[in-house]
């Protein structure tokens, strides 16, 4: 897979940004014990793996290591892992979207089911499915080097790829984000009605920073990945990447835009999240992480319940052990 030098330089810069994002998110995940940062960690880690596989295929195998023909089995295996990492990068955003939808539309349920351990299990399932979805792309034809026209197998793989990586996630994002926006508008109308009647509504009507970040991340994904999807379908039905230099250039630029999505996520996190900005600042200044991470909410509740029960039991035992005064003895008698 031949790559333009500018594309390689941009991917190297994006990889550094993603590593910085990964370290900052890890510190926040350890300190806050929130499921949100677990999902964002999975998203960033999948982005890094995807870029590493792309560089491994395009640079290490073809120019830096062998200086000769690369075994087809090795190329196809690494290409399959690249597709799996791409699928994981996209689909790691789906449980985050579902988590935000449940938080806004079913807040009581969200407090019960959203915690880091469950988020890690969900991410493990997503990564396993992404790995399995990359297996058919072992037979993916390299668009840059294959001169023949796409056959039926190429058609099936291309449509499977664009469905998994773009059309299906965009449908899920559009549905859940629409429900989130409708719920927020409904709350705003309720707020206006309550204000007109002179009452106050306890339900928040403003768009939260986390929800705003989610809407921005999914919208940027839909915009930046659209050119790549269009060029791949153009290659399938109109003119191939190998035969037309303009399609070749468009495909390279579309891939660069798709990879730019990861760097845009970093700036979105910085713009929306004050804790993330603080974590990035600590990483850049080589400051240590907090020694005592905060426990998750459900653990705090369990500890509070345990302490309350122990206090009440100690009070009961104290009442049993303490002898009664004469007046109380008379009353008891």
Image: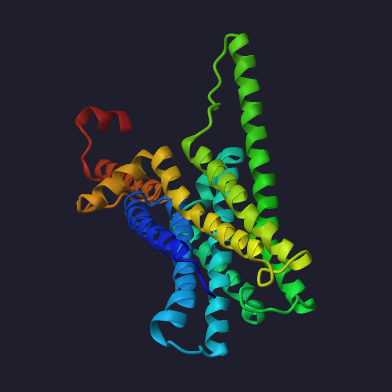
Q: Position of residue 279 (x, y in %)?
A: 30, 47
Return the residue nearer the eye: 248 or 106: 248
258 above or below 69?
above
Tell which of 109 and 137 is nearer to you.
Answer: 137
Q: Position of residue 9 (x, y in %)?
A: 40, 62
Instruction: Let me know if residue 333 appears in the view.
Output: no
User: Eyeballing the image, is 82 above or below 277?
Assistant: below
Left or right of 92 in this view: 171: right
Q: At 76% from the left edge and 78% from the top edge, which residue is drawn?
A: 153
Q: For the C terminus, which image quadrant? A: top left
Image quadrant where residue 82 sits: bottom right
Q: Is residue 66 left or right of residue 189?
A: left
Question: Is residue 201 in view from this perspective?
Answer: yes
- Along the line of sight, which residue is nearer the eye, 167 or 103? 167
Residue 104 is drawn in which quadrant?
Answer: top right
Q: Quadrant of residue 216?
A: top right
Describe residue 216's horizontal placement relative to residue 140 as left or right.
left
Number of numbered discs visible in the structure rendering = 0
Residue 64, position as x, y percentages in the image: 39, 81
User: Percent x, y for residue 136?
Assistant: 66, 78
């Amino acid at each position: 897979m031949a790559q333009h030098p500018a594309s390689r330089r941009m991917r190297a810069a994006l990889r550094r940004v993603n590593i910085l994002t990964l370290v900052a998110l890890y510190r926040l995940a350890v300190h806050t014990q929130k499921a949100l940062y677990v999902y964002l960690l999975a998203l960033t880690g999948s982005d890094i793996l995807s870029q590493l596989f792309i560089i491994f295929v395009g640079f290490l195998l073809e120019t830096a290591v062998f200086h000769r023909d690369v075994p087809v089995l090795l190329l196809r295996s690494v290409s399959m892992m690249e597709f799996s990492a791409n699928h994981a990068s996209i689909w790691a955003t789906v449980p985050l979207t579902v988590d935000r939808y449940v938080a806004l539309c079913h807040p009581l349920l969200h407090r019960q089911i959203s915690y880091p351990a469950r988020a890690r299990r969900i991410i493990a399932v997503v990564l396993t499915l992404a790995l399995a979805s990359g297996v058919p792309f072992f037979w993916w034809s390299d668009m840059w080097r294959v001169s023949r026209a796409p056959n039926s197998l190429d058609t099936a793989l291309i449509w499977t790829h664009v469905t998994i990586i773009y059309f299906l996630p965009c449908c899920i994002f559009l549905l859940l984000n629409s429900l989130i926006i409708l719920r927020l508008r409904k709350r705003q109308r309720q707020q206006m009605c309550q204000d007109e009647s002179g009452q106050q509504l306890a339900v928040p009507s403003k768009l939260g920073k986390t929800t705003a970040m989610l809407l921005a991340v999914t919208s940027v994904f839909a915009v930046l990945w659209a050119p790549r999807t269009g060029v791949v379908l153009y290659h399938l039905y109109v003119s191939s990447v190998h035969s037309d230099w303009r399609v070749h250039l468009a495909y390279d630029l579309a891939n660069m835009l798709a990879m730019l999505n990861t760097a845009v996520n970093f700036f979105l996190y910085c713009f929306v999240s004050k804790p993330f900005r603080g974590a990035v600042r600590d990483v850049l200044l080589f400051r240590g992480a907090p020694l005592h991470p905060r426990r998750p909410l459900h653990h705090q509740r369990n500890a509070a319940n345990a302490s309350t029960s122990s206090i009440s039991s100690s009070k009961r035992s104290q009442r049993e052990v303490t002898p009664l005064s004469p007046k109380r003895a008379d009353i008891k008698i």
